[in-house]
Amino acid sequence: MYGVWTPDQVRAAEEPVLARTPEGALMRRAARGVAQVALAELERRTGGVSGRRVVVLAGAGNNGGDGLWAGYELRRRGVAVTAVLLSPDRAHPEGLAALRKQKGRVLTRVESGVIAVERADLVLDAIVGTGARGGLRPEAATLADAAAVAGIPILAVDTPSGVDPLTGVPGEDAVQAAATVTFGARKPVHVLAAPRCGPVTLIDIGIGPELPPAPVDVLEAADVGARWPVPGPGDDKYSQGVVGVAAGSATYPGAAVLASGAAALATSGMVRYAGSAADEVRAAWPEIVATDTVGEAGRVQAWVVGPGLGTDDAGARTLADVLDAGVPVLADADAVTLLGQHAELRDRARGAPVLITPHAGEFARVAELTDDRVESARRAAADLGVTVLLKGNATIVAAPDGRVLVHPASSAWLATAGSGDVLSGVAGALLAAGLDPWWAGGCAAFVHARAADIGAGAADGPGSPVPASYVQQALPRAIREVRQ
């Protein structure tokens, strides 16, 4: 697990380090890190370094200084470097002087910069740093667009310019980076806008001891594997966790099949289904015990409720019955809508081990969603008294006590009908096995995303839509991978 800090927290941690470090030393260290990544990118993409062309898009201030000093380091390695100054009168003086001393080329006209970008092997985005907000200004947008049209990869310095470093929301014009180099600590943009950043390399500049506890954490495979339930010699189908699934309807029987099957595949000892899609569930999963009502289902260690359930009075009664069962509850889809519609149901959920898993539209029925998705989820969890898993390209899991996990998905392949039903079944299995709702949500999101990547390989090629059934079928392999 690694932490993510806000730009303000990182800047505050830098201050005491800067105070005890010779002037310019921290910037030089950061620039050397950028240069090393740039050299590796050139080697990987072109097979060599000497004579390759790099263009530095240098804005004002320290971010531009990082780029200019990185250009200096690249010149020392035989790379042809051109700096395009977007604010010539405010360019970092020491970095600019160093680049010129190494015979780096300097341009101040956008038109000349566009020609240089189109001929480059790599572009360094050192336009703005983490203190900036809003999209790119016209001159910078012209240069970034030139790189995009010509297919020239961009290496972002700290964050892709034009993307909000706190929320990950891109402005009207923003850099699409092939990779990003950041310093000291990862910022929210690196996980909330992971596709916009590309692979992120973290350069240690010595601020770690000065950082406060991370406000946001990101799980890694080892964290998930260590918590995934694995049966021991003394376990049986009951001790491994019994999941109840109240989902589906005559209109949406597939939701029941997907959620129940995912719970079975996610190492549950037993799955009990309750609902009107009992025949369809039995046909697809003969090992699942299927009944018509929650009352007939028998004892379970956790309930999954909501996918395809309906939002009528019958759906509300089913949700109430599940919340009154005294076991952890995963509430998804229609169950979230019902919570938004009925204050008495929200009162029953408050303070209980409940995990809700809304997408953005469903979230808006129970809480306010702003551009700051992390803060929106954190506030909703505190106000509702439940753990919130806010789905999206970056999935956010917020507990009522303020803990937050973010899972930065590597693709948008989960944006297909039914994939949320699969996630519900996986998280329900983990709740039944005894995981706290925050951990259950985080671990389920991790494995769910990995299963989507695996399922995409079984579809019609890279970038193809991934049916939810492919994701469901890939769960065992995804679980094996995190357990290795």
Image (cartoon, helix red, strand yellow):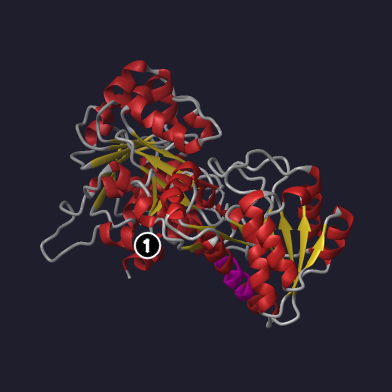
Quadrant for the N terminus, please: bottom left
Mark 1 is surrounded, within 10 Å at the Cα level, by few (under 14), some (14 to 19) or many (20 or more) other residues, namely: some
The picture places residue 458, in percent across and down from the top left corner, at 54, 66
- Counting the numbered discs, the total is 1
Q: Main secondary structure of the magenta part?
A: helix
Toward the viewer: 338 or 67? 67
- Secondary structure beneath dot 1 equals helix
Q: What is the span of residues highlighted in magenta in the rendered image?
A: 33-40
Task: Examine the rendering and report whether any part of residue 171 can be seen.
Answer: yes
Q: Is residue 474 magenta?
A: no
Q: Amino acid at mark 1?
A: Ala
**Quick check: 382 above or below 135?**
above
Toward the viewer: 440 or 300? 440
Residue extending furthest toward the right = 111
Quadrant for the C terminus, please: bottom left
The picture places residue 170, in percent across and down from the top left corner, at 64, 43
Residue at position x 87%, y 63% in the image: 115
Q: Identify the residue under disc 1.
A: 221
Residue at position x 23%, y 34% in the image: 296
Toward the viewer: 383 or 421? 383
The picture places residue 95, in percent across and down from the top left corner, at 66, 61
